[in-house]
Amino acid sequence: MNQFNIAELTTALLKRWKFILVFTIASVIIAAGVIFFITPKYTATTKLLPGNAVLADKARLFNDEIQHLYSFFGSGDDLDRLMSMASMDTSLKQVIHGFDLTRYYQIEDKDMGMRMYKSIRQFKKDLTLVKTVNNELEISYAHQSKDTAATVVNFMTDQLAAKMKNIWKLQYEKIAQQLDSSIAAISNDYNNLSSNSSSNDAIAKTKMTALLSQLEQFNKMSIETKMAAATTPEALIVLEKASIPAKISWPEKAVVLPIAALLGLVFSVCLVLISAKPSRF
């Protein structure tokens, strides 16, 4: 059986070194030419921290002893919740509508649902949501316009903050509505009891006293709940707002050109070895 002869291979490569060099340089030139005709993309990034959901508790707001016991920064669960909400299709649809990304991605499907579906898929390819080791959320977006890239990321941040904050606010508003409904019902019972009972009716007086106590308690709770709804804490903290990127993120010449050179070198070496046909290989 023929054996591998490194000497013959080395000789064949040395004889065709000019071809290998020219082929490698040509590969780099072709790659540079392709890059020149490709529309570049710019990536903008923002860094966020989740707000502490415990801060939305109205008990903390009205208790001086525990007001300062909780951190403003949320836990890993708060970050997961923030990340999940940022990646929801409903959130992405608002961005797509707001910046007319369907036209940007040149999606012309006649079916509206399919058009939005394809737009979301394309948008997700340019969007990156990363949970860092420091419990931060990084939102990055790549776009052909550097201004649009930064604007989209900051828009997503504002939208996410408003949605998270609104969730806490809506919960308190619902509770306040329930309390107001209970207050109206108790007030109605008190007025009916007051108008239909005599001044000597001890049982009626006892019931009226109990109703007044309930009214006082419910009114206090209603005021506190409405104050909590009006003073909901920030749902997220922006550590680094997205700024207009200074350089192209794709295609990255520092990566593409060396890879093109390496591939050109490997391919040209393979061509030389195949054409040389050494006697022992």
Image: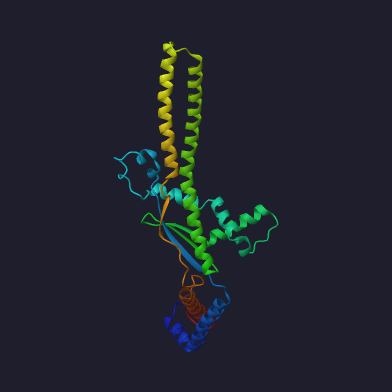
Instruction: Pick the residue in front: 121 or 263.
Output: 121
Residue extending farthest to the left is 65
Give x and y (percent) for residue 190. 48, 21
Q: Is residue 28 above or below residue 116?
A: below
Instruction: Pick the residue in front: 214 or 132.
Output: 214
Q: Is residue 238 above or below residue 164?
A: below
User: Can residue 261 be spotted in the picture?
Assistant: yes
Q: Splitting the image into 4 quarters, where does residue 30 fall?
A: bottom right
Q: Residue at x 48, y 25 (%)?
A: 187
Residue extending farthest to the front is 199
Query: Is 61 displayed left or right of 95 in the figure?
Result: left
Instruction: Pick the residue in front: 73 or 213.
Output: 213
Give x and y (percent) for residue 47. 42, 59
Give x and y (percent) for residue 5. 44, 80
Query: Is 171 displayed left or right of 72 in the figure?
Result: right
Q: Splitting the image into 4 quarters, where does residue 62 fall?
A: top left
Q: Residue at x 48, y 28 (%)?
A: 183
Residue extending farthest to the top is 200
Q: Is residue 98 above or below residue 235?
A: below
What is the tally of numbered marks visible in this picture? 0
- Which colour scheme appears in the figure? rainbow
Q: Residue at x 60, y 57 (%)?
A: 97
User: Can residue 277 be spotted in the picture?
Assistant: no
